[in-house]
Image (cartoon, helix red, strand yellow):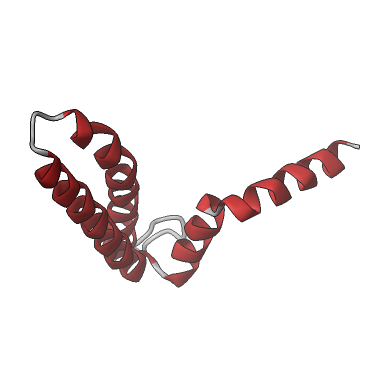
Amino acid sequence: MQKNSPLQKPWTYKAGMFLIISSILIWVISPVLIPFLPLTNGVKAISITTSLIIGEVIFWIGALMAGKEVANNIRKSFNPKNWRKKFVHKEQDRE
């Protein structure tokens, strides 16, 4: 009988991380690409809104699968309020 090494993650964690990464891609790519498609303005607006909602739902499903700590760390890293704090800490470490 083989035991799992401590570095191996369960499949739910891996699937959750995949969903989180794909949701970030949806959030970034959809507002950039959809406006250039040959669609009417109303369809473009609905498409962008729908894709952002779907991206958010996918993120939270992935967060449930990967774990609360992972989701909080990702949210903190993408929060612009925390960007300056990281820069200040890096500058203080260099001194």
Q: Residue at x 20, y 51 (%)?
A: 51
Residue farthest along the right direction in this orientation: 95
Count of all numbered marks drawn on residues in the image: 0
Question: In which quadrant of the rendered view does residue 31 lie?
Answer: top left
Q: Say which quarter of the image contains residue 94.
A: top right
Q: Position of residue 72 (x, y in %)?
A: 50, 65
Residue 12 pos. (x, y %): 28, 64
Q: Is residue 89 above or below residue 6?
A: above
Please report the residue visible at 32 percent of the width from the left and 66 percent of the height from the top: 60
Where does the image place residue 64, in percent across and percent down from the top left?
33, 71
Q: Position of residue 59 (x, y in %)?
A: 32, 60
As drawn, is 95 to the left or to the right of 31? right
Task: State left or right for residue 81 relative to residue 8.
Answer: right
Q: Quadrant of the C terminus?
A: top right
Q: Residue at x 15, y 51 (%)?
A: 46
| Residue furthest to the front | 41
Residue ID at (33%, 54%): 20
